[in-house]
Image (tube, rainbow, N blue to C red):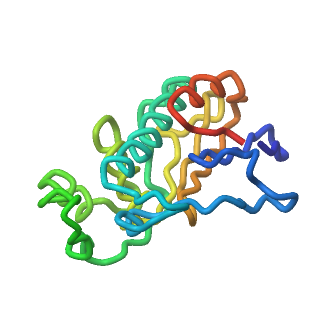
């Protein structure tokens, strides 16, 4: 966690145990970092789709926990890059479901743009699209109100999620750890 000027807290949220970071913040364990790693071996263990989904579910649940704690009910897309067409065609392993993206997710992907306001299941689906590297975008609390809590969510490389907020989230560490997520 890093606090910047203007009373903003900056967190890194991930499945990676910080005990395995070196002095420069690099992660030393051999771990998967993408949905494209499903079917590959990491330290002798093959990542299957079910295990991948457990982690993805934990990220989605973490965002919901943080939104609830910050009293944020909607997130607005403030920056967006799309990969192009959804890449479900790239995943042909027998462990993947036949239809990785349902009609709602496909329609959401096609329709999301800068300025789109997301609530409920739409937030969950967009987080999944971020984690699957289909989208790169920034989400910010909506409506913006400087007197209220602010929240910014984004996913960077290697399955790392950034959380910026004017609220100290340290009270959530145990709750997040219970679902396998680390708040740094």
The one nearer the camera, 78 or 171, is 171
Q: Position of residue 36 (x, y in %)?
A: 38, 69
Question: In which quadrant of the rendered image does the N terminus lie?
Answer: top right
Outermost residue toward the front in this view? 44
Determine which quarter of the picture holds residue 6.
Answer: top right
Quadrant the C terminus occupies? top right
Residue at horizontal 51%, vertical 62%? 42
Name the residue rendered at 34%, 38% in the picture.
119
In this rendering, would 134 be left or right of 67?
left
Number of callouts in the render?
0
> Left or right of 115: which side holds 155?
right
Residue 159: x, y in percent? 53, 58
Q: Nearer the viewer, residue 85 or 92?
A: 92
Q: Position of residue 114 (x, y in %)?
A: 41, 61
Compare residues 5 and 92 and report the one nearer the observer.
Answer: 92
Q: Is residue 108 left or right of residue 33?
A: left
**Viewed as shown, does residue 176 lie left or right of 2?**
left
Residue 162 x %, y %:
61, 51
Residue found farthest to the right: 23
The vertical placement of 179 against 139, above or below, is above
Residue at point 76%, 45% (across, down): 19
């Amino acid at each position: 966690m890093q606090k910047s000027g203007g009373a903003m807290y900056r967190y890194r949220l991930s499945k990676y145990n910080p005990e395995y970071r070196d002095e420069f913040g690099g992660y030393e364990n051999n771990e998967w970092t993408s949905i494209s790693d499903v079917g590959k071996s990491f330290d002798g263990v093959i990542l299957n789709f079910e295990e991948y989904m457990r982690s993805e579910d934990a990220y989605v649940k973490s965002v919901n926990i943080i939104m609830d704690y910050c009293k944020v009910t909607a997130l607005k897309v403030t920056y967006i890059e799309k990969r192009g067409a959804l890449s479900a065609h790239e995943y042909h392993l027998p462990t993947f479901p036949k239809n990785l993206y349902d009609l709602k997710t496909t329609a959401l992907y096609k329709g999301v743009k800068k300025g789109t306001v997301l609530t409920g299941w739409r937030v969950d689906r967009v987080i999944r699209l971020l984690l699957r590297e289909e989208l790169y975008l920034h989400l910010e609390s909506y409506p913006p109100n400087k007197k209220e809590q602010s929240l910014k969510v984004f996913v960077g490389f290697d399955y790392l999620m950034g959380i910026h907020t004017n609220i100290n989230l340290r009270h959530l560490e145990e709750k997040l750890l219970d679902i396998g997520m680390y708040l740094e």
